[in-house]
Every structure is written in structure tokens, then in C-alpha cells.
Image (tube, rainbow, N blue to C red):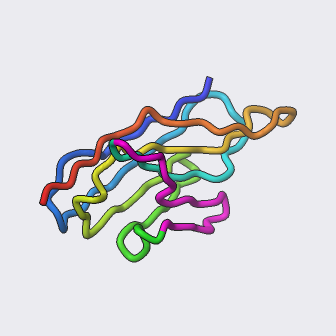
Amino acid sequence: QVQLVESGGGLVQAGGSLRLSCTASGSFTSINAMGWYRQAPGKQRELVAAITGSGITNYADSAKGRFTISRDNAKNTVYLQMNSLKPEDTAVYYCNALIRRSILSSVNAYWGQGTQVTVSS
């Protein structure tokens, strides 16, 4: 069983900051890429930022310059530091991880339960 547990969401005023965390637990051999997605009401889920096991990052245009993704491989944790938040950043944020459960298994995608981020104007 693999679980991704997120924390750090909440209500913040425009211009403020939040830091999301996501920790993977359970039985697995390795974690490849980890990332953050978000889904606003009535919209599709979209990639916000991703990071490979070696630390290569990728950001959505909307996140560049404001958000920073990082990971602590020893803690199986990925972070998303969000600065200069805007009302349009309001969404449920989901953690995603590509995890190999054993040396004989394939890599599968796992999702967290989501954490609400609300930015007031």
C-alpha cells in the first residue's frame, strides 16, 4: 500500500504565501518524478510543477517566478513554495508521484487526497 499525504493548504490573502508538503509512505522501492497538480471548480486538472529524482524541475507558465518545487529524497517528501499568490491560484492542489513498488514491478502514478488553497482578493 502506498499513500501520499498532503498538508499546508489554507486561506490566504492575495500576495501572500503558502507551503505545501506531500509525503509518500508505504512499501516501495523507489520514487521517480513527483509533482503538484491543481483543479479549480469547473476546470480540468492541470500540472503546476514537477521535479525528477535528480532535481530537474518543470513549471507551468502560471507558476514560473512565483512557485518553487523541491524534494527531500531521504524523507520521500515534495514541497511547493507558493509566493505572490493570486485569486486565480484558488484550487484543490494534488500531489502526484511515480513510484516503483518493487524491482520487478512497473512504475505507477499515485495521487494524494488533495488540499484546498483559497486566495482572497
Q: Is residue 98 magenta?
A: no
Residue 21, x across and y down, in percent = 40, 48
Q: Is residue 52 magenta?
A: yes
Which residue corresponds to the image point at 51% horizontal and 67% vertical from the top-left?
Answer: 59
Q: Is residue 48 above or below residue 39?
A: below
Which residue corresponds to the image point at 14% horizontal and 55% vertical from the top-left?
Answer: 120
Q: Is residue 30 left or right of residue 70?
A: right
Q: Is residue 36 above or below residue 56?
A: above
The quadrant the N terminus occupies is: top right
Residue 76, x across and y down, in percent = 55, 45
Which residue corresponds to the image point at 68% horizontal and 50% vertical from the top-left?
Answer: 32
Asked which quadrant contains residue 2, the reply is top right
Q: Is residue 82 above or below residue 22?
A: below
Asked which quadrant contains residue 81, the reply is bottom left
| 22 or 86, nearer to the observer | 86
Residue 80, x across and y down, in percent = 41, 57
Q: Is residue 98 left or right of residue 5?
A: right
Q: Is residue 40 left or right of residue 69?
A: left
The quadrant the C terminus occupies is: bottom left
Residue 72, x across and y down, in percent = 53, 55
| 81 or 11, nearer to the observer | 11
| 73 or 67, nearer to the observer | 67
Which residue corresponds to the image point at 48% horizontal and 41% vertical from the top-left?
Answer: 23
Q: Is residue 66 above or below residue 74?
A: below
Magenta span of residues: 42-60
Quick one: which residue is furthest to the front in this view?
A: 42
Quick one: which residue is furthest to the bottom in this view?
A: 65
Quick one: which residue is furthest to the top in this view?
A: 1
